[in-house]
């Protein structure tokens, strides 16, 4: 019995109509855009009577790369979708499916707490504010009230959730997550509005930097420009998968696309290598705390 969930579009002849039918199928939950894209890549190659080796030779892509596209292991980029559209004569069908899949993979985030709870390690980069998992209640309250003003009841609930998220970083939990954060020096230049709140936050950063499961590194301003332009978390799991949680101005996004993960991981590693060592970071925090007294 066939388990193919691809929507029936035999009567639909144009690329635009086929994409409209696929969007309806995706919206109804029948199939993911990524699965549709992979299905059509494999279907078109089979219809053309080509092996992966032959397709790789004609389109100048590696056989293993094309295989991963057809099985959904990789999403690839727009260039390969457009190349295959031209090769198969399918207009902009594959390019359109790729766009749908890309948007789907960068879905709006809403389950960060659950992801953090399941992660075995988290690599974070903070650009303008102390990462949420390292915030004191007072700093978090000021930050949330400023960035996302809410009613007192909602704010209290948000702070309770944050405390639960932070519990995984302590040794009191059976399996604390391994946490490494690279803090841009801008974070330390943008202090809390309340002096006592900022003093408490600096004390907390110093204390948490000594936790065995936590590593803090400061990226000094003199390290120069770089391409990581916003806060990012890279979460790794026991199954070997890695997700990237990208914090945006209007919305946050999650992506599991291997190309995105590889790109963000490389950028993160470059910043980590430019940052102060953990010992130098603690010393810098002590110096900064002394000047605030």
Image (cartoon, rainbow, N blue to C red):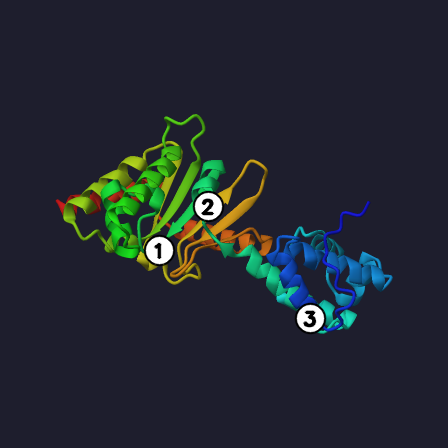
Residue in the picture at 48% in, 47% down: 234
Q: Neighbour class for label 1 at 10 Å: few (<14), some, many (≥20)?
A: some
Whole-angstrom CA distance, mark 3 to mark 1, is: 43 Å
Q: Residue 251: give x, y in percent of width and height.
A: 42, 58
- Is residue 55 placed above or below 187 in the rendered structure? below
Choose mark 3 or mark 1, whichever is in front: 3
- Is residue 182 placed above or below 78 in the rendered structure? above
Mark drawn on residue 17: 3
Residue pointed to by mark 1: 127
Residue pointed to by mark 2: 111
Image-based side of 121 in relation to 140, left or right: right
Image-based side of 75 in relation to 58, left or right: left
Q: Nearer the viewer, residue 96 or 10?
A: 10
Q: Determine if residue 92 is in view.
A: no
Q: Which part of the image, by quadrant, shows the N terminus?
A: top right
Residue in the picture at 30% in, 55% down: 148
Q: Residue 31: give x, y in percent of width and height.
A: 66, 53
Whole-angstrom CA distance, mark 2 to mark 1, is: 22 Å
Q: Of helix, strand and loop, which one carries label 2?
A: loop
Would you identify the image quadrant in which residue 76 lies?
Answer: bottom right
Pointer 2 or 1: first along the chain: 2
Residue in the picture at 61% in, 59% down: 101
- Is residue 122 placed above or below 35 in the rendered structure? above
């Amino acid at each position: 019995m066939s388990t193919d969930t691809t929507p029936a579009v035999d009567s639909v002849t144009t690329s635009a109509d086929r994409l409209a039918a696929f969007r309806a199928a995706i919206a109804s939950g029948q199939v993911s855009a990524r699965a549709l894209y992979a299905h059509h890549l494999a279907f078109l190659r089979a219809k053309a009577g080509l092996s992966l080796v032959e397709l790789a030779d004609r389109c100048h892509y590696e056989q293993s790369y094309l295989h991963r596209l057809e099985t959904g292991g990789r999403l690839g980029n727009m260039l390969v979708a457009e190349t295959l559209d031209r090769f198969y004569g399918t207009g902009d069908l594959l390019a359109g499916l790729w766009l749908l899949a890309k948007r789907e993979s960068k879905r709006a985030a809403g389950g960060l707490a659950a992801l953090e709870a399941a992660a075995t390690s988290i690599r974070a980069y903070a650009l303008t504010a102390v990462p949420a998992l390292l915030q004191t209640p007072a700093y978090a309250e000021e930050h949330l009230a400023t960035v996302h003003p809410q009613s007192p009841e909602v704010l209290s609930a948000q702070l309770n959730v944050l405390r639960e998220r932070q519990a995984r970083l302590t040794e009191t939990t059976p399996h604390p997550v391994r946490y490494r954060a690279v803090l841009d020096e801008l974070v330390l230049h943008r202090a809390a509005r309340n002096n006592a709140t900022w003093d408490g936050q600096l004390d907390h950063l110093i204390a948490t930097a000594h936790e065995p499961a936590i590593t803090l590194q400061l990226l000094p301003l003199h390290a120069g420009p770089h391409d990581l332009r916003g806060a990012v978390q890279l979460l790794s799991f026991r199954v070997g998968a890695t997700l990237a949680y990208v914090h945006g101005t209007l919305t946050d996004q999650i992506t599991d696309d291997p190309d995105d993960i590889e790109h963000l991981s490389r950028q993160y590693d470059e910043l980590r290598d430019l940052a102060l060592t953990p010992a130098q970071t603690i010393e810098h925090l002590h110096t900064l705390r002394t000047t605030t007294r």
